[in-house]
């Protein structure tokens, strides 16, 4: 009951335009202050303890590593490589934008950062070549989902941290789904581009020699996810430690290999990271208060009972959860969904005999897609804001892409091997 | 007054960057020392201490440029007058919330003066102190923003819908 009142207060504040982090904080502190039994100091304590966990350190470290990689000139190299690989196909720039998300996915863990970067660099070029505003925005926003699936992924770190699931296995499990989303989106974009006569960006395939040359130029970015997975796989390092190594790696690459990282760029990357971390962490810290209430009210247990009451069938359970998360993703911000649902859902699926790594990838893909689906989606807002696209145009053009991804999410839900093949093979 | 706030912002930003750089360096040292078989235990504790400070300083830096995520899909449909009234109400509530956190956080910090954190002799109070200090800084920033909305009709709508 109290949980419902709390959720209601939070939703009301959020939709009336209070910043999301504060909507969570105000609603939760209100609960503590009104409660006779629990002292408010516990809520405040939760804010501090939320940060005092070693696995969570992976978040700031990978945010910094991603921003540093961007400052080293890796982005430009990756775009050239993607152009050589796919620029000659029908709908060339759309394909390039999708492949850039996949390649950037290996160095960056945030969909919104990727969407913003592509909207800035590729968006204007797409409009110049006659792509509709809605289609350009939709391709850039929806494809940034790949970036959040291929390791490292901030969302998967949070899921692993909250659900007590191996972050290393989650990272490995993200590789194949990430590649599949890339293929599915490329196919969908190809169909649309062919019907509309969107031209290739370059005249012909430049040949494998050219691709190899471009790949060589961006090899430090391409090698990074390999190095990441190997480091975690052999248990040499924990994900947080790999995060610190990633920071060191990007500095070494930027200074010695590409020679583009100077003090000014380093400083700017550091400043951006502090801002990004502040944004993410304020939501995480204030949500920690709600987490206490959820546990206190035994919400996971009652939710589990309610859901198990509906069905005992594993596939049906997964299907219900996917639909639920997709709907929730339309109206809530992704970080909030992960923070609130992970502690509730992981015990439920484990009890039903579903592998939490499998569920993690299904849940995170669905949750992150929420950032690209109207009416509420941060990646969508970012891209549409930067390219001046109306939400109607975006929605109409994003629908086929979103539908393709949703179909893939269901495939992932019903065929666990898509996710689990690599983790089982390697770990 | 304005110069004082600018200086504060500069100092905070430098401190935030220092915390993040220090945090990364310490985790790296901890990882390497552990891999070499001679783990340095205090490095992780100090890294987590720097982390919470970085988080609050960063949150305040982001509030200064109104970077925190806002869902404006509903509010956008309201008449401007109502939007502005809501905005002023929100930021007033946020300031009250932050001041309450600062007060409760101070009490919590005073309780933790004796308790050591993890493997070091550093009092846990250094960690919890980030809550009241951070909340006070955030409240100051929010107060300045609120003053801006009240003074200038347009400020309430500037950059309000930009998530980045």
Image (cartoon, coloured by chain):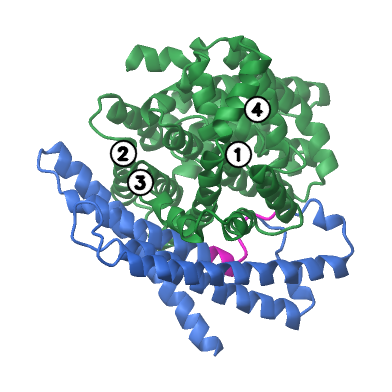
Chain colours: A green, B blue
Q: CA distance from mark 1 to mark 2?
A: 26 Å
Q: Secondary structure at mark 2?
A: helix
* Residue A43 seen by the camera: yes
Q: CA distance from mark 2 to mark 3?
A: 16 Å
Which label is found at residue A203? 4
Judged from this view, the residue extending furthest toward the right is B79
Q: CA distance from mark 3 to mark 1?
A: 20 Å
Which label is found at residue A337? 1
Q: CA distance from mark 2 to mark 4?
A: 41 Å
Q: Earlier in the sequence, mark 1 or mark 2?
A: 2
The residue that label 2 is drawn on is A242
Asked whether the residues under the numbered discs 4 and 1 touch, taking CB atoms below 8 Å apart as contact, a structural biologist would say no
Looking at the image, residue B145 sits to the left or right of residue B50; the answer is: right
Question: The N terminus of chain A is located in which quarter?
Answer: top right
Q: CA distance from mark 4 to mark 1?
A: 44 Å
Q: Earlier in the sequence, mark 3 or mark 1?
A: 3
Q: CA distance from mark 3 to mark 4?
A: 52 Å
Q: Is residue A364 magenta?
A: no
Chain bearing tag 2 is A
Judged from this view, the residue extending furthest toward the front is A36
Depth check, front residue: A310 or B44: A310
Q: Secondary structure at mark 3?
A: loop
Q: Main secondary structure of the magenta part?
A: loop
Q: Position of residue B57 (x, y in %)?
A: 45, 65
Discs 3, 1: same chain: yes
């Amino acid at each position: 009951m109290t949980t419902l009142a709390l959720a209601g207060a939070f939703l009301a504040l959020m939709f009336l335009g209070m910043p999301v982090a504060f909507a969570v904080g105000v609603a939760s502190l209100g609960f503590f202050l009104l409660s006779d039994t629990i002292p408010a100091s516990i809520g405040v304590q939760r804010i501090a303890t939320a940060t005092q966990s070693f696995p969570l350190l992976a978040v700031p470290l990978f945010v910094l590593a991603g921003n540093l990689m961007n400052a080293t000139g890796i982005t430009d190299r990756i775009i050239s490589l993607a152009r050589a690989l796919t620029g000659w196909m029908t709908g060339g720039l759309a394909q390039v934008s999708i492949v850039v998300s996949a390649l950037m996915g290996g160095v960056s863990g945030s969909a919104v950062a990727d969407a913003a970067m592509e909207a800035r660099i590729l968006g204007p070029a797409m409009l110049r070549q006659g792509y509709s505003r809605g289609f350009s925005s939709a391709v850039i926003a929806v494809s940034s989902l790949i970036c959040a699936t291929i390791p490292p992924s901030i969302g998967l770190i949070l899921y692993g941290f909250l659900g007590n699931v191996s972050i290393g296995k989650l990272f490995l499990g993200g590789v194949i789904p990430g590649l599949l989303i890339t293929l599915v989106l490329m196919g969908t974009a190809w169909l649309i581009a062919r019907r509309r006569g969107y031209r290739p960006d370059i005249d012909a395939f430049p040949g494998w020699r050219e691709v190899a040359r471009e790949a060589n130029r961006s090899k430090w970015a391409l090698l990074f996810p390999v190095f990441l997975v190997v480091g975690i796989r052999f248990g040499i390092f924990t994900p947080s430690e790999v995060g610190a190594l990633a920071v060191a790696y990007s500095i070494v690459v930027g200074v010695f290999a590409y020679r583009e990282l100077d003090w000014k760029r380093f400083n700017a990357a550091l400043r951006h990271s502090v801002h990004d971390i502040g944004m993410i962490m304020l939501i995480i810290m204030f949500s920690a208060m709600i987490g206490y209430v959820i546990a206190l009210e035994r919400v996971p247990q009652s939710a589990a009972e309610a859901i198990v009451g509906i069905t005992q069938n594993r596939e049906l359970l997964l299907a219900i959860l996917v639909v639920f998360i997709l709907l929730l993703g339309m109206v809530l911000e992704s970080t909030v969904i992960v923070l609130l649902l992970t502690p509730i859902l992981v015990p439920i699926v484990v009890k039903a005999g579903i592998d939490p790594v499998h569920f993690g990838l299904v849940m995170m893909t669905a949750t992150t897609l929420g950032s690209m689906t109207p009416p509420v989606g941060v990646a969508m807002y970012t891209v549409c804001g930067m390219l001046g696209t109306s939400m109607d145009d975006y929605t109409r053009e994003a629908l086929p892409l979103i539908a393709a991804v949703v179909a893939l999410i269901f495939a992932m839900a019903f065929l666990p091997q898509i996710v689990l093949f690599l983790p089982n093979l390697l770990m | 007054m304005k110069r004082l706030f600018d200086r504060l912002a500069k100092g905070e930003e430098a401190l935030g960057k220092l915390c993040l750089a220090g945090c990364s360096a310490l985790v790296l040292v901890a990882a390497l020392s552990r891999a070499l078989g001679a783990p340095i235990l205090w490095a992780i504790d100090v890294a987590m201490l720097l982390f919470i400070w970085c988080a609050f300083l960063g949150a305040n830096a982001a509030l200064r440029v109104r970077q925190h995520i806002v869902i404006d899909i509903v509010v956008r449909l309201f008449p401007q007058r109502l939007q502005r009234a809501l905005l002023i109400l929100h930021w007033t509530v946020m300031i009250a919330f932050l001041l309450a956190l600062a007060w409760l956080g101070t009490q919590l910090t005073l309780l933790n003066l004796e308790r050591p954190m993890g493997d070091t002799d550093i009092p846990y109070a250094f960690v919890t102190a980030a809550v009241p200090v951070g909340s006070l800084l955030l409240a100051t920033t929010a107060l300045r923003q609120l003053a801006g909305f009240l003074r200038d009709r347009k400020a309430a709508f500037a950059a309000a819908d930009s998530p980045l």
